[in-house]
Image (spheres, rainbow, N blue to C red):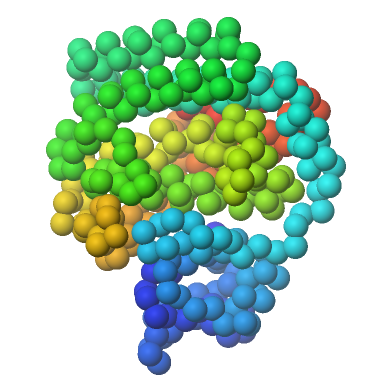
Amino acid sequence: MATLYLTEQGSKLKKEGRRLIVEKEGERLLDVPLIKIDSVLIFGNVQLSTQAISVLLESGIRTAFLTQNGRLKGQLAPIKAKNIPLRMAQFESAHDRNFAVAIAKSIVKQKIENSIQVVVNFLHNHPNQELSEILHQLKQIIPTLERKTETSTILGVEGRATVLYFNALKQMFRQGLKFSGRNRRPPKDPVNALLSFGYVLVGNEIQSLLDAIGFDPYIGYLHGIDYGRPSLALDLLEEFRHPLIDRLVLLLANRRILNPEDFEQRSEGGVFLRKRSQKTFFVHYEKAMTQPIGRQFGNTCFRDAIRQQAHKLANAIQNRTQYVPFNFYGR
């Protein structure tokens, strides 16, 4: 199954039988069997026929609407999953302070450990004294989590670890695109544009998956409840930011698959991928999502791993058991 990325401005998505058709000004740009599509991402000004909307809903195909810059605007969602027991358990557990703190702590601990593994993997081929020192500091942060009993202080630990990790990431861009530090809303350089774009894509997949399983994606544990923020989706995203998206961006930069000319400064501010270059990113994003993660994971890909983690989280919430986040060490 594949994701259909629609970026051609002024085009229209239609349905013919059991096929999805993309047309623009009378020209057929794409013709794909419905059975091959798992999700649809629509960027900017792309129209959908009523028939296309209907078949997407009937087929349970996740459909998201984003700006041309990659900011999520909303989703086309079928009737909510009938998993009322899960939502009730989620509502109750969110008010169980000890349980919520335990989940938040486990997510942050694993996020830091996953970031450590990303650095370790890089150091294996590129010894660097500064990176080794940052690695040591990251390892020292993990034990401080044990003493934390409030989500706010757990987020404080996560923040300190993130600063250290991005200082390490700066050293890992060896050629091509360079990285001077994390910035966003809007991203001010190509690497930050890629990081933000990638996080949005994965976050959208996670939010759609949580919705399909029966969660309320807006009730989280680490991020807490904030109006209009899909906090639970952001919770689950933390486990995958560094091993999935950051490594993808490193590959695109260090192998010069994307270069400075693939980006543009927009009048509204910020740096973004050019439309033609988005297609290159989508190809490599799909490879990252669908190819086996590594030998220690067997045939499991990141898309499978995300689905597995969502179901693990559902089980932990319903049974009030310990949640075990995604471990990039593979054990």
Q: Is residue 300 visible?
A: no
* Picture quadrant where residue 45 is located: bottom left
Which percent across, then down, holds residue 33? 55, 74
Q: Residue furthest bottom?
A: 26
28 up-or-down from 324: above or below: below
The quadrant in which the N terminus is found is: bottom right
Q: Nearer the viewer, residue 165 or 307?
A: 165
Question: Residue 26 placed where, x, y %?
Answer: 40, 92
Which residue shows up at 66% across the image and 19% down it?
102
Task: List x then y, in percent, for residue 238.
Answer: 50, 33
* Residue 276, picture quadrant: bottom left
Q: Which residue is located at x 18 percent, y 43 percent?
A: 177
Depicted 76 relative to depicted 86: above or below: below
Is 235 above or below relative to 114? below
Question: Residue 119 lies in what quarter of the image?
Answer: top left
Q: Is residue 158 visible?
A: yes
